[in-house]
Image: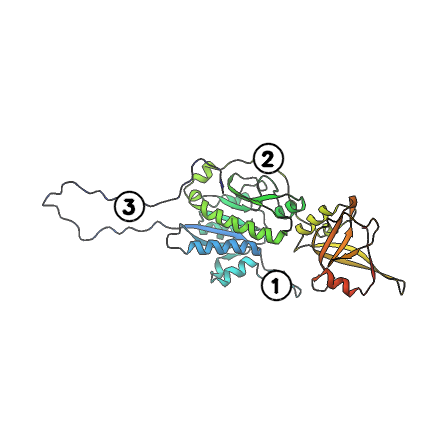
Amino acid sequence: MHHLSSSSWMLRRFCCHATPSFSPPTAVLSTSAATLTPPKKKKLVFMGSPSVSASVLETLLDASSAADSLFEVAAIVTQPPSGRDRGRKVMPSPVAQHALDRGFPNDLIFTPVKANEEAFLSNFRALEPQLCITAAYGNILPTKFLKIPLLGTVNIHPSLLPLYRGAAPVQRALQDGVTETGVSLAFTIRALDAGPIIAYEKMKIDDHIKAPELLDLLFAQGSKLLLQELPSIFNGSAKTNAQEQDDSKATLAPKITQEESWLCFDQEALTLHNKVRAFAGWPGTRAKIVVIDEKNDKRSELDLKIITSRVYNDAQVSKDDDVAFIKGSMIIPCGGGTALEVLEVQLPGKKVVDAAAFWNGLRGQKVKKLGL
């Protein structure tokens, strides 16, 4: 862990009893000692929506239940229920569902469409929260909101800020093929992911890891980092020692769109492999191929979802558009004399299958890549 201050210390409570060297014989000791009441726990509000946020909430709820905890989770703010899955059944966000499963009071789970709604702000203000924690909440926080928590709002952001500010930091980092990323703990200000950094943790990236796995790892690490830094946040030293970001080094990680999911085989295989890793889960990566039945002189175009890939390292790569099948994998020629080795695919409406099962289903038909 990297601390961004010269001093970092844990809160401790000391009870010092002075022992007099002389006690007059007439002294009368009280039979009832003053009762020491433990300090009141800080009110913390958690804000998050997807499943990675639910894992952070789990960590906070567990920590808050400890006897020596400095805080309590006073409320949860998350996105409103929405239609999910194929049936489009309206369901709570993963964070709301997790909170309900844990027995968290329903009336303390807030689901405003926008965080600037007056009714929500009024309820939030009435809680008198000392601190707000955000983790992939998915909503812009207005100035009126940010002024309410006495100790501010702290965000867990899955990148090494100021790199990859924005909605898709993990996906964009993988798409760029970086070999190191991390998670940052930073105060929230009105500018996008630009607040002072409390602490950060670096992490190496394997060339096979996909976005959903990396997100889980980074938010798990971010939860640990948050628990380590909460005492300094509560006593104010974190705000004093937090480091301002260097805006000149900032890069952006804009939200991914469905239109970006197509693979263009004119690009080199490494670029395409990094995109497959980055877009895993949603929206995925798609490619157009042509299946040719030479016996009946028929051609059919398919939209194929590429689920798992790697760069094909054999020097002998086809220079035409033919897709080969070698040792259980589909080999697709790409730009610059490179090739993409495809290990798993998915047809529309079908389950994910390995390349061998897909190839066997073609029953000897020929496959060519198709340009966009």
Picture colour scheme: rainbow
Badge 3 element: loop
- List x then y, in percent, for residue 11: 38, 44
Is tag 3's residue or tag 2's residue first in the polypeptide sequence?
Answer: 3
* Residue behind mark 3: 15
Q: Nearer the viewer, residue 329 or 112?
A: 329
Residue 139, image x and y in percent?
A: 59, 49
Marks 3/1: CA distance?
Answer: 53 Å
Residue 50 pos. (x, y %) = 58, 55
Tell me the residue at 42%/45% (across/down).
Answer: 231
- Give whichever of discs 2 and 1 has the lower sequence position: 1
Taking depth in this image into account, of 276 and 199 the one nearest to the observer is 276
* Three-letter code for the amino acid on which mark 3 is drawn: Cys
Residue 290 position, x and y percent, is: 82, 58
How packed is label 3: few (under 14 Cα within 10 Å), some, or many (20 or more)?
few
Q: Are marks 2 and 1 in contact (CB under 8 Å)?
A: no
Q: Identify the residue position indicated by label 2 in the image.
A: 247
In front: mark 3 or mark 1?
3
Q: Mark 3 vs mark 1: which is more N-terminal? A: 3
Query: Is residue 348 visible to us here?
Result: no
Residue type, label 2: Asp
Discs 2/1, front: 2
Element type at marker 1?
A: strand
Q: Nearer the viewer, residue 265 or 189?
A: 265
Give the class, few, some or many, for how many residues have Cα within 10 Å of label 1's Cα (few <14, many ≥20): few
Q: Name which quarter of the figure residue 351 lies in.
A: bottom right
Q: CA distance from mark 3 to mark 2?
A: 45 Å
Q: Are the residues flagged by discs 3 and 2 in contact, CB closer than 8 Å?
A: no
> In this view of the protein, which residue sits in the foreground, 34 or 226?
226
Residue for badge 1: 90
Q: Counting other residues with Cα less than 10 Å from the Cα at mark 2, is it few (<14), some (14-19), or many (20 or more)?
A: few
Which residue appears at 13% of the width and 48% of the height? Answer: 28
